[in-house]
Amino acid sequence: MTYAILIVDDDIAIKESVEEYLKILSYEVKSAHNAKSALTLLETFHADMVLTDIMMQGMDGLELTKKIKAKFDVDVMVMTGYSADYSYEEAVQAGASDFIFKPFRFEELDLRIKRVLREAEFRKERSLLLKEMEQLAITDGLTGLYNSRQFFHQIKQEIKRYDRYSRALSMMILDIDFFKHYNDTWGHLEGDKVLMRIGSIINACMRSMDTAYRYGGEEFAILLPETDLKMACVVGARIKDKIATEIFRPEPGETQSVTVSIGASELVDGEDFTAFIKRTDKAMYKSKQTGRNKLTYS
C-alpha cells in the first residue's frame, strides 16, 4: 500500500530534502510552503499524514494542526527546531500524533512516520471491527434482517417520533403458515432456506423508509413510518402475493410453496408499544383463524 504524505514548511531546503527522501521510500508526496496552501491542498489530496513545521509565516503549525484535525481524518506530525519554545504536550493537545525536533536523521523520521501510520491503520481496523460487532448485535444471522432486540428499540423510537410530530406509523406482523409441518417434513435446513428467501422478499418489497425484523422463529415484523394503514396494507399485500408465488425445491423433483398470514395496524393516539404490538399480533392471528394466506388489519 502506498501512503500519501503532505509536507508543510516554509524552509525550502528542508521541504525539498524531506520530500525527495520520502519519495525514495515510495511515499506519495506533495508539499506546501504555508498553512493556507496546505489546507487548500487537503481538499483534493487525500493524505494519510501531514508533516508540518511549527514556525511558519502566518498561521503556525499548531494552529494548522487544530484546523486539520477539525476538518480532515488525517494524522499530523509536527517538527520544530525550537525545542525550548514548544513541548510534546502542546503538540498533542493541538491534535498531533507525534513531535520531532530539527535537525533529525531521515532514518528517525522514517521510523516515526511508520509508527504513526501503523497506529492509524490499527485504529481504522478496530473501528471497522466495532462497527461489524454493533451490526451483528442487531442483525439476525440467518435472514440478514434486523433482530427482535433492534425491533423493540426501534418501535420505541418511532412512537416517540409519532408523539412529537403526529406523523402516521404503521406496523405489520407476518407468520409463515404451517411452518412446523414444513420443517418436520423437509428438515430444518430446508426450513432455513425458506426463512432466508422470505427475508429477501420482504426486503425487496419494502420502501426505503421501512425496516424489517425477524421477530420470532417464523415471525417477521415491519415498521412503516409516515405510513397510514391503507398504504401499509398495499405493501403487505405485495409481500403476501410475492411469497405465495415463490417455488421451493426441498428435494430433487419436489416443489413446494408457502404462504404467510399478516396482521396490520396503525398507531393510535395514547397507545404504547406493547398495546400496538398486541393489536397487530391479534390481527395476524385472525388471518390464521379465517383461512391463512391473507392480510387482516386492525
Image (spheres, rainbow, N blue to C red):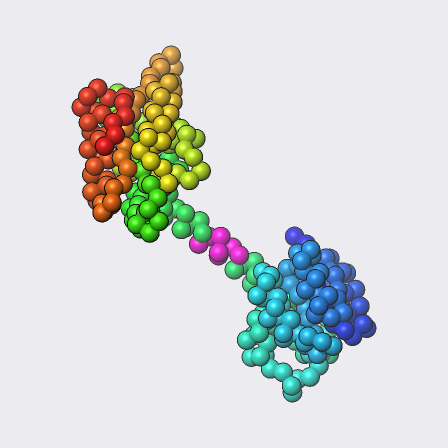
246 vs 297, left or right, is right
Q: In which quarter of the image is residue 293?
A: top left
Q: In the rendering, at what x and y percent does residue 113 appear?
A: 65, 66
Please name whichever residue, 229 or 214, is drawn nearer the observer in this view of the structure: 229
Please name whichever residue, 269 or 297, is drawn nearer the observer in this view of the structure: 269
Task: Reply above or below: 254 against 233.
Answer: above
Q: Residue furthest left?
A: 289
Task: Please report the residue visible at 63 percent of the width from the left and 75 percent of the height from the top.
Answer: 62
> Which image quarter is the C terminus in?
top left
Q: Is residue 82 magenta?
A: no
146 vs 122, left or right, is left
260 vs 54, left or right, is left
Task: Reply above or below: 71 against 251.
Answer: below
Q: Quadrant of residue 167?
A: top left
Region of the chain picked out in magenta, as a range: 124-130
Main SS, magenta region, reads: helix
Please name whichever residue, 57 or 178, is drawn nearer the observer in this view of the structure: 57
Q: In the rendering, at what x and y percent does residue 218 appear?
A: 28, 32
Task: Please report the residue visible at 44 percent of the width from the left and 49 percent of the height from the top.
Answer: 132
Q: Residue furthest bottom?
A: 84
Task: Reply above or below: 101 against 237.
Answer: below
Q: In which quarter of the image is residue 256?
A: top left
Q: Which residue lies furthest to the right in this view?
A: 13
Task: Please report the residue visible at 79 percent of the width from the left and 64 percent of the height from the top.
Answer: 20
